[in-house]
Image: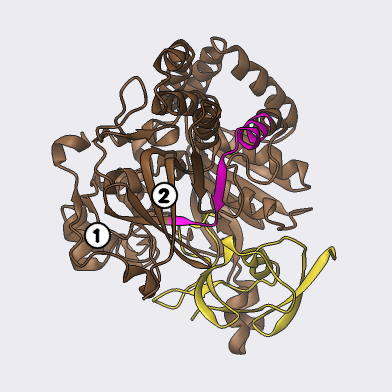
Chain colours: A brown, B yellow
Amino acid sequence: MNNGARQGFEIFVIGGGPAGIAAAACAAEAGAQVAIVDENLTLGGQIWRGGTAEADSSDASHWHSRLKTAGVVTLCGKRVFHQPEAGVLLAESADGLSHLRYRTLILATGARERFLPFPGWTLPNVAGAGGLQALVKSGLPIQCKQVVVAGTGPLLLAVASYLRKHGAEIVLICEQASWSKLARFGIALFGHAGKIGQSFQLAKELKGIPFAANSWPVIAHEAKAHEEKAQGNNAQGNRVLEAVTISRAGKPTTLKCDYLACGFHLVPNCELPILLGCRILNGYVQVNDFQETSVEKIFCAGEPTGIGGVDLALMEGQIAGLAAVGRRSEAQALFGKREKFRRFARILEETFRLRPELRNLPSDDTLVCRCEDVPLSRLREHSSWRAAKLHTRCGMGPCQGRICGPATEFLFQWNPDSIRPPVFPARVENLAAMPAQSQPRSVAPAELE
Amino acid sequence: MPNEIIVRVNGAPVSVPAGATVAVAMMMASQPCRTSVTGEPRSTLCGMGICFECRAIVNGIPHSRSCQLPCEPEMDVRTDE
């Protein structure tokens, strides 16, 4: 058995997005020995991935250079999947297994998009909004492609702007929120000087792109015409998106497109915090004023404590980093700014709350769990996430419920019951490093609501 | 470093920009990354290594998350059946 590399640091930061980078930089500037671990090949998280929206890039380079100057050790391409004993994490990478030994941990695991099932959502070329942006950032040519951007949240606008800048034709942005909610959101922005500047910039970039509120995708259509041509073993290659039907302010409209970029705001990545025993409150990691979780010596910053975007993530990261090295008064000095960004987070949540009609999007045969191909009709027979898992294998595939979990939470108000190690699928030889009986981490129902 | 890299997707050569991920190569070749348990073609959904829809066979290794994997010259990529 390969026991893997062992690395020890006073402070390990898990997640190299804005919150993690700020936390690591602040802790290291205070003299601590800090390492930052990320599963991606480069730091930056999703928002600062490979050069991003101009509004953020000066922030990104500022923090990247502080991180470097402070001497933070960067470990990229490593995915943490288990804690076999207190103070030790196991991480997997292309070159094998690592044991990460820490005294203090800062979790900055970020967020992912929420996906809702609707007929045709499993077709190739239907991707997340952030998902399609990530593909374009990873080299996908998008020039002259027709893209419908749909779902909810400020990410839709940022993605549409980014894709257009790279040559895409944005057919329509469909936002499920109502005009009245969006108007209140616009007014609320006036309380946030930085945000209003960013949104004016964005508004300029979005000029000329059709935008519809009260609108959402109802069916993604497959390219039928190609099926006859596609005989033989290449047949699958042609089963691909051709158009999408949108419910546009109550009226169905069908739009031709090459890609549908669709995401319904964000959900926090709480799997690792739950595995480590951190208390969850209303779906988020509960932290005190100093970003400390219910587990001693484990801090949490950024989206897992509440979806608030990059400014809040940076502020929480700084507070966590300073508090983790005992610089509590410096951390305290940032509380006021953090509160301002938290107010913005509450407005985000209220504006982009999913409307109940979206529960009717999937039809009986729409797959809800894409790993195990479980349709809606089979889930309706069950009364809880656990029962559905046991009887249908919903949420038991490789994504371990990361995609269908938030969907069923919205569709049926089901809550996840426990997290079992490994939190990500790991190779068998690396699983051998796990202790024989790893108990699942239960989340008591009281902790969920 | 060349500006383009050639990889093989389900046997056919595809030219991709240097630095592109395997998921991008598959999308450019209009080939699905994997076939689902009921036989549906699937391609990348989340683009950030969480959904596992982009898993493909890369140089013979099944279940490789193609959205996290940069293309290399002569790479052999196949739909994960």
* Residue A116: mark: 2
- Residue A73 is a magenta residue: yes
Q: Amino acid at mark 1?
A: Leu
Residue A114 appears in the figure: no
Of residues A393 and A125, the one drawn nearer to the viewer in this rendering:
A393
Task: Kindly identify which chain the residue marked by label 2 belongs to.
Answer: A
In magenta, the rendered stretch is A62-79
* Helix, strand or loop for disc 1: helix
Estimate the x, y position of residue B47 in percent, counting from the top left: 56, 55
Q: What residue is drawn where x is 17% and y is 52%?
A: A384
Estimate the x, y position of residue B45 in percent, counting from the top left: 52, 57
Q: Quadrant of the C terminus of chain A?
A: top left
Of residues B30 and A274, the one drawn nearer to the viewer in this rendering:
A274
* Helix, strand or loop for disc 2: loop
Estimate the x, y position of residue A350 in percent, counting from the top left: 40, 24
* Residue A50: mark: none
